[in-house]
Amino acid sequence: MSTSSVNLEDVPSESLMSELLRRMRCSSKPDKRLILIGPPGSGKGTQSPIIKDEYCLCHLATGDMLRAAVAAKTPLGIKAKEAMDKGELVSDDLVVGIIDEALKKPSCQKGFILDGFPRTVVQAEKLDVMLQNRGTKVDKVLNFAIDDAILEERITGRWIHPASGRSYHTKFAPPKVPGIDDVTGEPLIQRKDDTAAVLKSRLEAFHRQTEPVIDYYAKKGNVVNLPAEKPPQAVTAEVKKVLS
């Protein structure tokens, strides 16, 4: 949030005070640079905001950052848009450059959580070089390790009521009548991404892509395997233990 886009005089006092208090609380926290790796449904999305708030880190989702850079027409964003318009993939160097830019923001002062990047060993190497140039490195890679069979049960059991967004699970939170919304009596649907066939291909792609990345960081000794099959509170406790 730069003063050019937001006049601080117009920001409510409560917002300013709570941000100042947050920064004071954060100033004593140790710096942390984390990478989160895990298949769809492994609970990464649940833990990420908890880790972010607990350790005052910024959350870097490369897809969102690329879209923001393109919208803001930054020099890197303009280059990224050129590639996208040609139907090409945005180069690794550009993505690493956009991460480098983001790390200059005050919200990233204490470190970051990278989610969805690096996906390849080449990207991991380029990220390492960029961080080295900043005099830092990746501290921990949190690997949300979970058996594919458990994931399949978690994900393929999900049913939703499209109008309200209410969600159910055939095993963990079933509706009173199978396939029917408790409140309206309307039928439930399954997202096409939640079917066994789609999940199987997503998991195969995930393992193929990320296993080499996990091996790359394991050789450096900074991978922590989290028991992602456990309930969220237990995973949070484990995360705090490995990061403290």
Image (cartoon, rainbow, N blue to C red):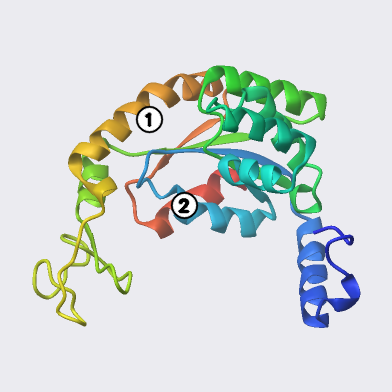
Q: Is residue 13 found left or right of 71 in the rendered image?
A: right
Element class at badge 2: helix
Camera-side residue of 197 and 176: 197
**Tag 1: amino acid:** Phe
Within the image, what quadrant is residue 6 found in?
bottom right
Number of other residues with Cα within 10 Å of mark 2, as a class: few under 14, some 14 to 19, many 20 or more: few
Q: Are marks 2 and 1 in contact (CB under 8 Å)?
A: no
| Disc sitting over residue 33 in the figure | none
Name the residue located 62 percent from the left edge and 23 percent from the top edge: 91
Q: Is residue 90 above or below residue 41?
A: above
In this rendering, would 175 be left or right of 10?
Answer: left
**Residue at the spot x=63%, y=19% of the render?**
125
192 or 114: nearer the eye?
A: 192
Would residue 138 be seen by someone viewing this image from the given angle?
Answer: no
Q: Position of residue 221 (x, y in %)?
A: 57, 24
Give the residue number, with chain letter if any, for mark 2. 45
Q: Disc count in the image?
A: 2
Write down the residue under mark 1: 206
Task: Report the Cα–Cα distance between label 2 and label 1.
Answer: 16 Å
Q: Earlier in the sequence, mark 2 or mark 1?
A: 2
Specify the amino acid type for callout 2.
Gly
| Residue 21 visible in rendering | yes
At label 1, counting other C-alpha atoms closer than 10 Å, the crowd grade (few under 14, some 14-19, many 20 or more) is some
Depth check: give the residue in front, 102 or 171.
102
Q: x%, y% of residue 132?
A: 77, 24
For the point 78% across and 69% down, which residue is it? 19
Label 1 secondary element: helix
